[in-house]
Amino acid sequence: MAADATAAAHLAAVTTRPGNAGAFRIAVITALAIAVMTPVGLIVYQSFLDGPFFDESAKASLWAFKYVLVDADFWRALRTTALFAFGLVAVAVPLGAGLAFLLTRTDIPGKAILEPLVLVPMFLSSIVLAFGYTVAVGPSGLVSIWFRETLGGVPWNIYSLWGMIVIGGLSHVPNVYLYVASAMRSLPSDLEEAARSSGASMWRVLLDVTLPMVLPALIFAAALNLLLGFETFGIPLVLGDPNGIVVLTTYIYKVSTVFGTPTYHVMAVVAVMLVLITLPLVFFQRRLLRHSRRFAAVGGKGARASLLKLGRTGKIVAVSLVGAWLFVSVVLPIGGIVLRAFVDAWGEGVNLADHLTLDHFRKVLSEASLYRGIVNTVLLAVIGGAIAVGIYLLVALAGHRNTGRSGTVLDYMVLMPRALPGIVIGLAFFWVFLFVPFLTPLRPTLASLLIAYIVVGLSYGLRILQATLLQVSPELEESARVTGASIGRTWRDIVIPIIRPGLAGAWALIMIVFIREYATGVYLMGAGTEVIGSLMVSLLTSGAMDQIAALSFISVVLTAVGLGLALRLGARIHD
Amino acid sequence: MTELVVSNVKKSLGGLPILQGATFEAEKGRILALLGASGSGKTTLLRCIAGLEQPEEGRIEISGKSVLDASMGLAVAPEQRQIGLVFQSYALWPHRNVAENVGYGLKLRKVPTDEISRRVAAILEKLGLSHLAARYPDQLSGGQQQRVAICRALVYEPKVLLLDEPLSNLDAKLREEARFWIRKLIIELGTCAIMVTHDQGEALAMADHVLLLKDGVIVQQGTPIDIYSQPESFYSAEFLGNNNVTKGRVHGAGGGGVRIEGEGWSLDGEWRGRRALASGESGRAVIRVERVALASGPGPHRIEMDHDASLYLGDRWEHRMRRGDLRIRAFGPNRLPGGPVWCEIEPSAVWVFEEAA
């Protein structure tokens, strides 16, 4: 009798193992693995064939590897990419760290306005930024012309590796700032005060205490930006390509024009090479992050009592420095875009006021594909962004308090797409939708872009959602379980209602990510599924600058709307 | 009636044993306290009963139904164990008002809506919270939150009520009051309650039965009076109460008693060690401070001491005295007059144990 009862209870327990929504977790993680690993697998598979994978005569071969490895252009591109990536880090890290120091540890005036402003470049697509710089300080740019008129010459050339490095570096400053500033903010000031009271000067303290404490954040920011440097596509395409300066991403983009026919196997090999560089960087970052968390745990929430007093002159110098950086990295490109979008002629001796026009926008709106691009971008950002947040939420829940092996698998799956530049993910999904039989009907629809976008935004989106989920104290969930709620019911009744504001903020941030995305759609978009960013890439080849200017302006406006929404919904940009 | 059976529950974390075979039973209408220092495994034991932690070994039965049997791979989910748990932090859901927090367990049990509101109103009334039904947790004081947490855990009539340090977040005055009303409520409802605490005063005042834990082992269990006055080990003796502890050589004395000696002093006492005394071995004695009486002249069981210092505690004085390497603290109503002082300690108050357990 008692044995019967325990046996029955045993059966019941098999389906309700505590702390585990096993079936749900496994289903979600499997779906995620398919979505992430299919494109990666396809690229690797393609790299070992001697023809396109859908061609029946294609055989396993190392031909493409041999071709690429003896191609001088490839080696030149690899070298340029490395120079660009390291140069970008060398520019962005000191500037970002200095900016973070000024804004978090000194009494610089106007912090409330400066803080959101310094993040602006992060929210714009690099193709829009690069175009903005072309218009402002390019050889026939508005500022360059003014310079030539007044000084008789222009001392810079942005269509060079140096130009790319400086502009790439400037636009990645916010990525450094974000991490270093949050490390400096969480630095308990009693550590610094202890050093000061033992007789160290403010600058001594900065070197001996502050710097070593934020070093993990600096290293992490450097590794992150190195990765972003290797994956950049927009800046090299706009600034490097006209002078034949090629990086790995643009090499992939251009390789078909070299052959005249799609050379999928060569593209795949270069993509594999790129991933061989980026994947170790991603895992290096993962380890760093664990370390820096441990580091951060040392510090308490010490109220920051002492800010470095800059003094009158110091304040003027600091504000001028920040102002100069803001002018170069925000005002110049955006101002260039705004101006260029509304004038039809400029040059020496031209009064811009006489040439104000709305023609560029008329052109954009009258051309069906461009008009569709705007509508599609908004649809993808607003509706697609909401769907993406829903999917990220499912994935985050599958990993939520999941200490089992499936949790580790999920962790790695989520990191995988970070090693893949958008153009590579787009290319891989293009192949998937082109040749996986039951998926082909999706290709001419926005669903194909949305799926690729969701994979591109996966690690960013998940970071936001996991941080949000961690705010729910475990006891709130445990008390629901004990009260009689299953794990699914607990998620529905307790966890999701509590994080609802966080979900709205995440939606706005994902919206911005989707608006600025340009590389993923380069191969994937077709007639009917155009998006602003990728349209600009293809318009570059035809040189339709008026339309690009108008589209850039629209992109900036959409981003500003998204950013306003994010701030309103209380999205936490400082994670 | 036995409502909870815990037998040989073992759990380790990262190779470190947290629980090393806990076995006990608890009854309806009685309160059992799990008492121990931090790290003794008391909270882990409570969470194992709730199903929030999975022990590697052992069996747990709630109301005659097996909810855990590690040897059979049986582990019933927390939501199916028919328990109520009051968290140390209360863990009230911030997005639900008081009535919704309390009514959630009934809603999950598919109780009709009108009955839910009737039962929620009844229990809120009982704990004097009726006027707060529409408030949200952040609009409540700590004491009110605690009452709501208790209502939430009791409203669906769980078989076992678990309380994790239920009083530790209250201020001193409220805590005294809560000891009384929580005990009254549980006895009135006839629930089987298990309470975790590190505060011996709380355990002794509220519980019918106390389990003393040390390093994942139950070192002693019994009624509060037994636990306090009949310690079975040096640890139990020293953990509870306010004590004088001293070391010395132990010799057998006539009539089953022993004598412990140090430099220039000796005291008659009782042997409480686990094994038989080997005369002349070194041992430790525990003397409750309140069992030391002060006298102004010599007499039986009195020892002359030097007065060191006195601390004023408000309701009494604490006097510190010394003789050789013996240090004794005693309470007294007044300041000491000065001059020689004698401590009177009955042999039954000097508990002598072996040197190392």
Image (cartoon, coloured by chain):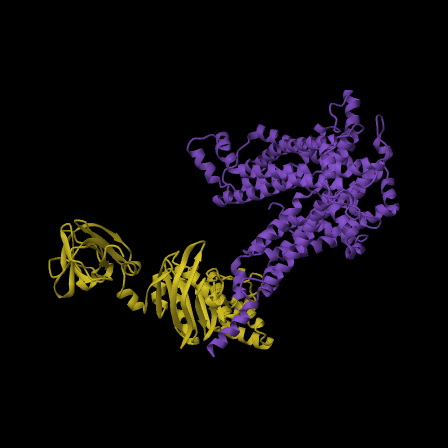
Chain colours: A purple, B yellow
- At a point 57% along the width and 66% down the height, the residue shown is A486
| Relative image position of residue B299 (x, y in whole percent) | 11, 60
| Relative image position of residue B6 (x, y in whole percent) | 41, 69
Side (left or right) of B209 relative to B251: right
Q: Quadrant of the N terminus of chain B?
A: bottom left
- At a point 37% along the width and 68% down the height, the residue shown is B206
Q: How many marks?
A: 0
| Relative image position of residue B271 (x, y in whole percent) | 20, 62
Residue B131 higher or lower than A496, as above or below:
below
- At a point 60% along the width and 75% down the height, the residue shown is B113
Q: Nearer the viewer, residue A340 or A93?
A: A93
Q: Nearer the viewer, residue B216 or A429?
A: A429
Residue B341 visible in rendering: no
| Relative image position of residue B152 (x, y in whole percent) | 51, 68
Side (left or right) of B167 relative to B339: right
Residue A111: name its quadrant: top right
Residue A418: name its quadrant: top right
